Amino acid sequence: PPSPHLNSPTNNPSSPPQKQVHKFGGTCVSSADRIASAAELMVSQLARREKDQGPAASAAVVVSAMGAHPSSPVKVTDLLLAVVAKAASRDARGFSDDLAALRAKHAETADELLLGSEGGSSGRAERDAFVASVDADIEDLRAVLQAISIAGGSGPSTSGSAFADYVVGHGELWSARLLAAALRARCGADAGVLDAREVLVVTPTPDGTSVDVEYGPSEAALDAWGAKEAAARRQGAGSGEGQSQPRSRLPRLVVVTGFVARTADGQP
């Protein structure tokens, strides 16, 4: 339901600061220059809102997986779906090649986005941390795909299966990490990442084509994430990996994974 403060004047000191949510689809984050533009837009929007709300201004940014671009025709979600299908058909060479293509697309984008004068000295650290996280995820995915391959066509290989849902959700996770890294390294913004699978609890509908949000558990999970993130930032270990100074509050720009959630028992 809408917040009772949704229509409150922003300059009313008795009203809490309005929250703002932006959404960038796959085309908007399909290349280094488009991710850079999205980061710059978010920083300029936040600066504009600071004039009314002061340092309490904040925003959430929801992102899709990287889409296709003339410089890189790989559409990440399609390729992740393809690796599941290839694993189910026991095409180990095929899904290995696709994993390599996914890794290359994200690493090359990170190089262009974070290295060089725009990223400054923090750009290298952000790039290395991001690529290391992608490499770790790729190895996890390889293990999952090998399990699917062993089961073959009789295994849980359909697009709606738990295996497939787990695999495909990585596209949004990588995109969110990359945008947050750009916000920090290129723009000096206070930015962190929220994996929606940690906080968004849903129940699949009987027809299997959609989900219903469980607002009570979701709100409780979001509160728990906020407390955990604030504690981690006090120790300098929050989701803003490039932060040079620990902070006790939450990131002013939170980049959230679109498309993904979890069931009450934790299944992506």
Image: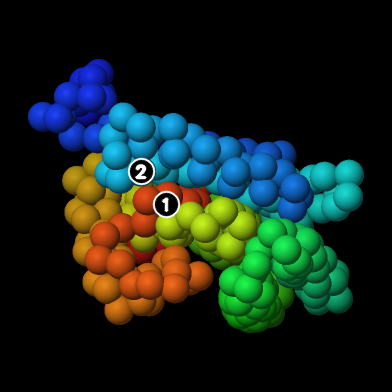
Tell me the tag on residue 99.
Answer: none
Query: Mark 1 belongs to which amino acid?
Result: Val
The x, y position of residue 169, in whole percent, is: 56, 57
Q: What residue sits right under mark 1 in the picture?
A: 254
Which quarter of the rendering shows the C terminus? bottom left
- Asked if disc 2 and disc 1 are in contact, CB closer than 8 Å, the reply is yes
Please tell me which residue lies in front, 138 or 184.
Answer: 184
Q: Judging from the image, what secondary structure is the residue with disc 1 in?
A: strand
Q: Identify which residue is drawn at 24% across, 35% down.
A: 17
The x, y position of residue 95, in whole percent, is: 79, 70
Q: On screen, 105 above or below 147? A: above
> Where is residue 83, by image quadrant?
bottom right
Is the image coloured rainbow, by chain, by secondary structure, or in one colour?
A: rainbow
Q: What residue sits right under mark 2 in the picture?
A: 58
Query: Mark 2 belongs to which amino acid?
Result: Ser
Q: Please name which of the two marks, 2 or 1, marks the residue nearer to the observer.
A: 2
Q: Judging from the image, what secondary structure is the residue with disc 2 in?
A: loop
Please tell me which residue lies in front, 228 or 83.
Answer: 228
The x, y position of residue 260, in whole percent, is: 48, 51
Q: Identify which residue is drawn at 26% across, 60% down.
A: 249
Question: Pointer 1: residues within 10 angstroms few (<14), some, or many (20+)?
Answer: many
Q: CA distance from mark 2 to mark 1?
A: 8 Å
Q: Earlier in the sequence, mark 2 or mark 1?
A: 2
Q: On screen, 87 above or below 72? A: below
Question: Pointer 2: residues within 10 angstroms few (<14), some, or many (20+)?
Answer: many
